[in-house]
Amino acid sequence: MKNTAVWGGDKREIFLEERPELVPPPGWLRIRVAGVGICGSDLHTYFGGGPQGGVPGHEVAGVVDLAGEDVSLARGSCVAIEPIASCGVCANCLTGYRWHCPRSIFLGGDGDGGMATHMLVPEAASFVLPETVLPEEGSFVEPLAVGIHALNAAQVNPGDRLLILGAGTVGLCTALVARQLGIQEVYITAKHSFQADIAKFYGAIPIKPDEVLLQLKDTSIDTVIETVGGRTDTLVTGLRAVRARGSVVVVGIFTENIDFPVNELLLKEVRLIGAVCYARKGAHFEFAIAAQMLDQVREEIQCIKTHSFSLAEISQAFEIAADKATGSIKVQICP
């Protein structure tokens, strides 16, 4: 049985292969994958050609079906996976920034991800889902955690005016998080009408990407969250839209360098912040916060899931995710 999706090495090449049964080492779990989302960063890899034999998928949730030694999480537990395996003892790990651990492995990047029937994960990266949340719905915890991390990095306040650039999964999840944090005035750029409709449902105000500076010229934007990346000029738009001494947070992954208005950054004294993944500060684990928040927004977040495929349909799933003419936002694999 072909049980694992792997990159083929060439552009747009992904296929299934059979791999041996996974056995978790001490401190690790094996989960039966219930749901895994195709992320924009997966599409960047898809377009460019993924590392041959690598297993994609970092938006993952499932059910524990086998535990290694020194594990306390019970079999049958429904969990969302924070896709970072790290040493746990270096300065970055101890201060909550596990992404920056020099020995970290990103599961679904340089480590095997969840586009498979089963996946190995550290117990320390497994977060139990609320009882009301279905296992496959837990894959939305990851993009919610990205939005939480971005807004925390910006140090937003309930009275702030927020502009989100991009109405893909991360942009829309950030709008949902912002509403949960009490931010009432949220603008979001939406290239497609189906994205704008969901943004309105979430209480945000959609704007066409090429009309941002015109429509917001008389609006004092406190914080901009950039979620598009790629080859776009969204960072320039953000710097020009934000107020003096405001914040621009970069979440989107850029595939090439862009022209950058340095003097605009300087003269407006804008805080430019990079925000990657999620953090753990004291008792406040952003991934755990996202898991609990999912319980509050689970009905609304279903709007983002536009397509669902089996693992056997992996090639079709990526084709749909890569073509926005299909109306796709979040394409989910349910093995």
Image: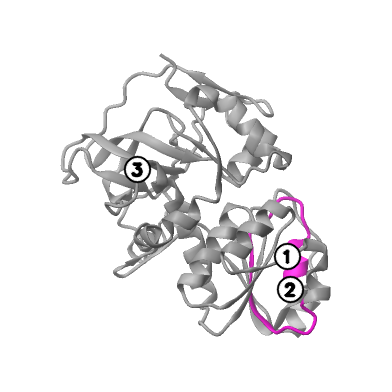
Where does the magenta region start and end? 216-239
What residue sits 31% from the left and 46% below the top? Answer: 79
Residue 99 visible in rendering: no
Q: Which residue is mark 2?
A: 239
Residue type at numbered disc 1: Leu
Q: Which residue is mark 3?
A: 135
Element at label 2: helix
Quadrant where the image shows the C terminus = top left
Q: Nearer the viewer, residue 62 or 94?
A: 62
Residue type at numbered disc 3: Pro
Q: Relative to 318, is 31 on the left or the right?
A: left
Q: Position of residue 17 (x, y in %)?
A: 48, 17
Q: Earlier in the sequence, mark 3 or mark 1?
A: 3
Q: Relative to 220, is 83 on the left or the right?
A: left
Measure how far apart labels 3 and 1 are at the Cα level: 36 Å
Whether residue 231 is situated above or below residue 57 in the rendered picture: below
Measure how far apart labels 3 and 2 are at the Cα level: 39 Å
Whether residue 154 is situated above or below residue 53 in the rendered picture: below
Label 2–label 1 contact, CB within 8 A = yes
